[in-house]
Image (cartoon, grey):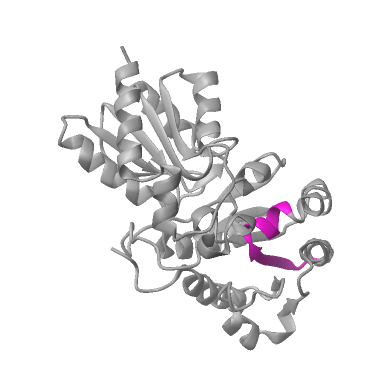
Amino acid sequence: MLESIEMRKAYGDTMIELAAKNPKIVSLQADLTGANGMKEFHAKYPDRSFNVGIAEANMVGVAAGMAACGMLPFVHSFGTFSTRRCYDQITISVCYAGLNVKIIGSDPGVGAELNGGTHMALEDAGIMRNLPGMVIFEPVDSTQLKSALPQIVDHPGPVYIRLFRKNAEKIFGDGYVFHWGKADLLHEGSDVAILASGVCVKEALDAADLLKSEGISARVLNVSMMKPIDKEAVISAAKECGALVTAENHSIINGLGSAVAEVLAENAPAPLERVGVRDHFGQVGRARDLMETFGIVAKDIAAAARKAVARKA
């Protein structure tokens, strides 16, 4: 079931609440204030809101300067532009300098829809994962986002948020509490573990239902933090289920699948099948059609799970 509130609305409202408690929070935009759900924030805090225009690299440089002066800047753009376009500035001015800047990349992967391949961030988390000290967070719904944002504000270092802008599938209830760096167990299972992120989490749950009808018990985990990855959850899944599948709205190269593979190789080798975009640029289309095209829906995840289980022998 889709949530009644858009993710960007939940984000903007929560940021207004957090800014009321923390006067150091400032917002920087690259001419996408409305698109990122921050119009109300900018109206309420005009002295703490800055639109630098379509100049993302400069925006990160400005944010780094603000952070060096004790402010807490949140910079916003589409995922392609808040990462790839200003990667050197993030690397040197933020991470190398050890500054506390939060980076929001909206419309990850198929979320870009009709904006097409030029705006489709399928490698954003991967390149950010290379940076020392960078945290990568992808909320699955607005409930998780609202629970995580106060902890992101309190974290004393750079964070990259892959923010789906529109209505997400509702995964968590109102009593949910976000635990930093921990995966969320959504469905118990013993034959195979499916570790999913973002829009692929609902697909993973649907895949578990498909597999159940075939007598395959699938554990489903929501991995909202690719970095730091929940090593304990990955190792437990390997030892207790014996086979794993990852599912992500991202390239399988240096994404969630790669992060899980690294943990397995170093700690608990087990069969792993990765579901994600396979070395391909994005393209124009509706999100659901693109997910079908890229092979990241429930039937694809279920097929990968069958293959992983068969490899256990």
| Residue 256 higher or lower than 26, as above or below | above
Name the image quarter holding the N terminus: bottom left
Q: Residue at x 84, y 64 (%)?
A: 65
Give the image location of residue 61, x and y in percent: 83, 62
What residue range appears in magenta? 70-84
- The picture quadrant where one finds residue 130 is top right
Q: Position of residue 126 (x, y in %)?
A: 62, 42
In terms of depth relative to the viewer, which is nearer, 60 or 135?
Answer: 60
The image shows residue 232 at horizontal and vertical percentages of: 45, 31
Task: Residue 308: say if magenta.
Answer: no
State whether residue 90 is above or below residue 47: above
The answer to whether one can see residue 24 in this image is no
Asked whether 278 or 166 is in front, the reply is 278
Give how far across and how far down residue 158 sits, in percent. 69, 53
Whether residue 76 sits left or right of residue 259 in the image: it is: right
Q: Residue at x 43, y 65 (%)?
A: 142
Q: Quadrant of the C terminus?
A: top left
In the image, residue 81 lies in the stretch drawn in magenta: yes
Whether residue 130 is visible to the viewer of this picture, yes or no, is yes
Q: Is residue 89 left or right of residue 145?
A: right
Residue beneath the point at 47% across and 56% down: 139
Q: Nearer the viewer, residue 155 or 309?
A: 309
